[in-house]
Image: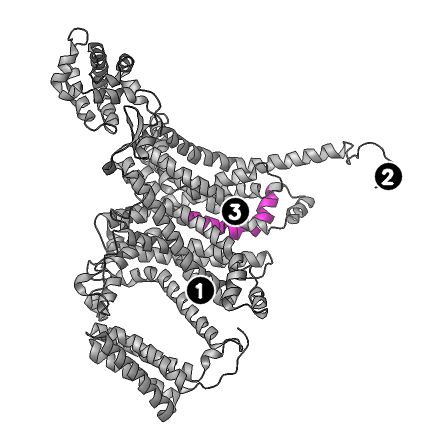
Amino acid sequence: MAALTPISRKPMSLVLPTVAAAGGFFGLFVGTANGSGLLGVLIGAAMAVILAVVYINVLKNEALSKWINIALFGVLGFVFGGGIAAALIGLLYGWFIHWFTYWLYEGRYRARLLPYLTPGQALWHYSFRVICGAIFVFLITPVLVVMPLSFNAQDFFTFTPEMLRLDPAGYSLKHYQDFFTNNEWQRSFKNSLIIAPVATVISVSLGTLAAIGLSQAHVPGRRAIMAILISPMIVPLIISATGMFFFYSQIGNWMEATLGLNKTFVGYVKVILAHAVLGIPFVIITVTATLVGFDRSLTRAAANMGANPVTTFFRVQMPLILPGVISGGLFAFITSFDEVVVVLFVGSAGQKTLPWQMFTGLREQISPTILAVATILVGISILLLATVEMLRRRSERLRGMSPS
Amino acid sequence: MSDSTQTGPMLAADGTPLKKSLNRALRMQKIRALALITPLLAFVLLTFIIPIGQMLFRSVENDIVANTLPKTVIALQDWDAASGEAPDEAVYAALAADLYVASNAKTHTRVGSRLNYETPGISSLFRKAGRKAKKWDVEKDGPYKEKFIDIAKGWSDPNVWRTIQTYSPKYTNGYFLNAADMQKGPDGAEIRPENERIYFTLFKRTLIMSLAITAACIALAYPVAWLLANLPSSKANLLMILVLLPFWTSLLVRTSAWKVMLQQQGVINDVLVWIGLVADDTRLVMINNQAGTIIAMTHILLPFMILPMYSVMQTIQPTYLRAAKSMGATNWTAFWRVYFPLSVPGIGAGSILVFILAIGYYITPELVGGTKGVFISNRIAFHISTSLNWGLAAALGTILLAVVLILYWAYDKIVGIDNVKLG
């Protein structure tokens, strides 16, 4: 797409019908909201055409017409839609239709395309992007939609009229306050913060060792071992949970009766072991992926200069594969932190984790505090995602691979 | 080396034959690798494989009848179930002796509820009889046949006795028959009456919905993966965040978000009503049914489809398409005959992954599926935690696990399990 194609103005016979279609499309929604879809289409199309003709043939000043258009539709939205939200949509639409008109008229849409594309191909190029855009919207909307709702002043899961009018009275922090003061939420949060890190440490330490073992040149039965180690990710959680439910209740009874351990402690041990197993495949996958690019002659060089295997591991190999280990650890952490099926079966009320609390909250009493928690969790996942991305780039740099 | 004067096997520096010394080095290497792997392997075997094996075993295990009613089981061996008559006094006496022991150990209700899975009503027979049997003096209080029939009419029903006889062996295929909507009739296994077949419907629904989810994921992931693979990497990395953010976001957050979006007073319905596509009194029902499950799970599993597709498409040279076009192919031909076949491995990898994950899903169907949109997993959970019919849960789980393991094997063959990539 690098070639800069010379652009030229397009005839009005192309610009006006397209602009009319866009105007009509928007008019359809405004029209149906106010009673008549057909009338909306006609008015929308007519307005778009008339304004385009006026701006291009009469006004002949792009910057000025832009502001006129934005202001015009903003006022229209405020008057007919009633309220600040409608006015905002009006402003946005005003900006868009003006930009769209000039984008077509000046032929700017061609600037980034290869010069030899046919009109049909150009049309497909942009429709394809619109389709992809829609899919991205589908992907990201659910994650974004919980954020404003978590500031709802009402105990509803929906946008109240006050919120839509951007009235400050419609917003509050009370759900966050509930999360930070409610005992049950705090206890489950604390439980998650105990269980996830310990489970992560177990799966990272064992997983890294095994990944190093697996990456050696000669491992008998590597495929079978790999299949077993990855299986916790593949076996449906409900089956793992069922199996662990029976197994860990026996183990738990044995630990309490024979070893005489504290019941709460045994409960934590059970959940931690279960979560550690679930996190192992992620550690194995990420660490083996990092080890693929590891230069084996480095360890030989270290051994050559007199380092013992342990020193070699900690001073040579570990620093190089550390990014992979950390991102594997983050995966394991999020797996445990996000896990609900297994803890539901294996844990008892004393080990109630945050996801468990959310699960019961969603199933039984619909409390909007869930949305506040959800927003906090999205924040955490953004942080984790950023860390992993940073580590990936660093790892590529360390291994001398070009950033892709 | 050809001009070496040495004859015989080649020697290493320390004088041992080179072959032997190489073999020793190789063996050391293998042992070292295994030593590194062993702790984890043992851990996974102990805390994951054994529990699952135990669960599989539970689906055929049936020693409760033989353990609780040992004498009855022996006495019943000679009774002919086809006779259509209740057994004779000897069997009732044996049952009285067994129940006396069992009711004092409080295990008779367990046997009752075990047999109740097979023939409803037995549980209450055992409860009633157990209450009385506790006070009997087993040696003297006979004859028992009338006594039992006095306690509850059901004890004279040959069907009850047939159930006890059928489920007296230590191992049973009864749970599996149950899971396949069959039962043990007088002449072996038979299909249950039409109105009692629930598991077949559930398995079929699970399969069809998982396929629908996989298909929806392919349709949505393909354009996105194509776009990501063909954009310059700086832009692709930015857009990748939009894919990875949902991937990293908690499953429960996404499920609750879909609950917020799809419910009748939810965001989507509000928007549709506001722009007038749907009237206020005919709001769409998109949650607590199959549509809700499919939409939410498609969203949740979409990244698992995009990522493998993207990594395959990245390796396809854009010049292939240009070459095809320069030789006269139309856009469609160039895509369909050149690009698409090259991208099939990505589709395969993603599809199997998504299908495997979808078929065993529990949380999302439970929360947004209502009654019509639940999967077989939800039924398993129900049997574990509510109906306590663990054997049946284990049998259902075994069938599900078998399906998943076949797919896992296929995935390993096609893609290779060490080629899974995350993020």
Q: Are marks 3 and 2 in one subunit?
A: yes
Quadrant (top left, top right, bottom left, bottom right) of the C terminus of chain A: bottom right
Would you say the residues marked 1 and 2 are in contact, meaning their CB atoms lie under 8 Å apart?
Answer: no
* Residue B340 within the segment the image draws in magenta: no
Residue B299 horizontal side relative to residue A326, left or right: left
Range drawn in magenta = A310-333
The relative height of residue A85 versus residue B32 in the rendered view (above or below) is below
Residue A70 horizontal side relative to residue A199, left or right: left
Q: What numbered label is drawn on residue B4?
A: 2
Give the label, 3 or 2, closer to the camera.
3
Q: Residue A31 placed where, x, y %?
A: 23, 75
Instruction: Determine the residue positioned at 37% across, 45% down.
Output: B359
* Residue A385 seen from this side: yes
> Which residue, given by chain and number where applicable, does mark 1 sit on?
B239
Which comes before the other along the chain, label 1 or label 2? Answer: 2
Q: What numbered label is drawn on residue B414?
A: 3
The structure's colour scheme is one colour
Q: Chain of mark 1?
A: B
* Residue A325 within the segment the image draws in magenta: yes
* Residue A351 seen from this side: no
Q: Amino acid at mark 3?
A: Ile
Which comes before the other along the chain, label 3 or label 2? Answer: 2
Q: Chain of mark 2?
A: B
Q: Residue B91 placed where, x, y %?
A: 23, 12
Q: Amino acid at mark 1?
A: Leu
Would you say the residues marked 3 and 2 are in contact, meaning their CB atoms lie under 8 Å apart?
Answer: no
Q: Residue A249 placed where, x, y %?
A: 33, 31
* Image quadrant in which you'd find residue A10: bottom left
Q: Residues within 10 Å of mark 2 (few under 14, many from 20)?
A: few
Q: Amino acid at mark 2?
A: Ser
Front residue of B309/B180: it is B180
